[in-house]
Amino acid sequence: MPPPTNTTMVDGNSMRPFADQNEVMDPKRNPLVIKVDVIIAVHNAELTIRETVKSAMYQEIPAHLLERKINLNHGGKEVNLVDKTDVGPRHEFSMVDLQFDVCVSCYNDASTDKSLAILHSLQNEYMQEEKSPSNEQNAGSEGHSSKSVIKTSLLVGTSKEGTSSRGAGFARNQAAKLRREHEQNQRNLNTDECNNIQQDNEMYHFLCILDSDDIMHPTRIAEQTFAMLSLAYQNNLHLCEKTLMGCQFDRIPYDSTWHYSQWANSLSNERLYLEKFRECTLIQPTWFLSAKWFERLGGYVEAPVSSGSSSEVDSQNPAKKTKSENEKDLDSAAICNDGHLTSSDNSSVD
């Protein structure tokens, strides 16, 4: 996928964030942590899953973004972004000042082929690389500076043996839980790794959707993160918290479904809104959104539970909410399993 150019956002006057006028963020002593979870639903993908995962694991910060500046302001427990029209103390961060914490989160949805075995094999490979003393040297071995390579971990979850597939919506919801489960396990074990778990900047925790038969452009995470952090404020809310962002894509082979690809890749910001009644204008495998917003929306609408398996599903989703509970805070917004974002109030979905 090429770098993102088509994004959805609300236009409006940016709001000046609340900030401690005497405190300025120092990126060297207290770097801003950016969490990104690459969400991959896996079902019988043995022919493609290895290349898909590798494309997400070896992401880079492109040269043109390495020294690009983002204006940041420190306000209490949060680091608030401000635009060029804001006044008051602020510190300019570059992309290399940010501390990326990326997890490729794969959930195996009852595959009957070798998908799960391949995922476990990849997990072992990356664990060995992490333990290797030459790991950091190898990071920049292919003509790239080590500071431009984003450190990434691989998390694998799977359904119980003998169960039936629940569909992509269910699998993506489960994949989105893997980081939290992993971090909770580390806390329970009281390992050294738990000391590195950052919780303060949950506003900067994003989900990056990827299909198990697609590959990512090597700079996608950095490009979409930069675009998110560069958004303005509206009504005291940073728009990255409620923005669904997409990007352009390439087809392999290049000329397959050329008419659809040309339409989707050439939409203006205005057409992104107007043509949503015709088709999903942001292609789902290019989605990038706030993890907090995803949770508030209730995640994907899942396929109905087949008879005889409700007890298993209930045990995996102990905190299920009723529709009315979700709508209380969300103006009836939801992410649907067919890839469409819907709402009874268009102003609540950006």
Image: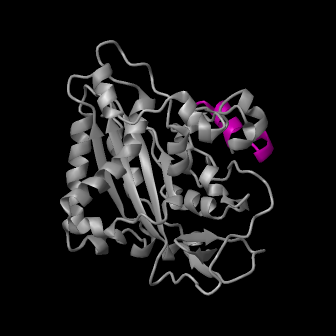
Horizontal and vertical percent position of residue 246 = 61, 46
Horizontal and vertical percent position of residue 111 = 28, 28
Horizontal and vertical percent position of residue 262 = 68, 38
Q: Is residue 126 visible to us here?
A: no
Q: Is residue 135 above or below residue 320?
A: below
Horizontal side, residue 269 vs residue 240: left or right: right
Q: Is residue 282 above or below residue 86?
A: above
Q: Is residue 234 above or below residue 114?
A: below
Q: Main secondary structure of the magenta part?
A: helix
Q: Residue at x 61, y 70 (%)?
A: 80
Asked whether 301 or 245 is in front, the reply is 301
The residue segment tinted magenta is 256-271
Q: Residue at x 80, y 57 (%)?
A: 12
Task: Examine the structure image and report whether residue 269 is included in the region drawn in magenta.
Answer: yes
Q: Report the residue that reaches farthest toward the top.
A: 307
Question: Residue 329's image quarter?
Answer: top right
Task: Examine the structure image and report whether residue 19 is included in the region drawn in magenta.
Answer: no
Q: Residue at x 60, y 34 (%)?
A: 327
Question: Residue 50's image quarter?
Answer: top left
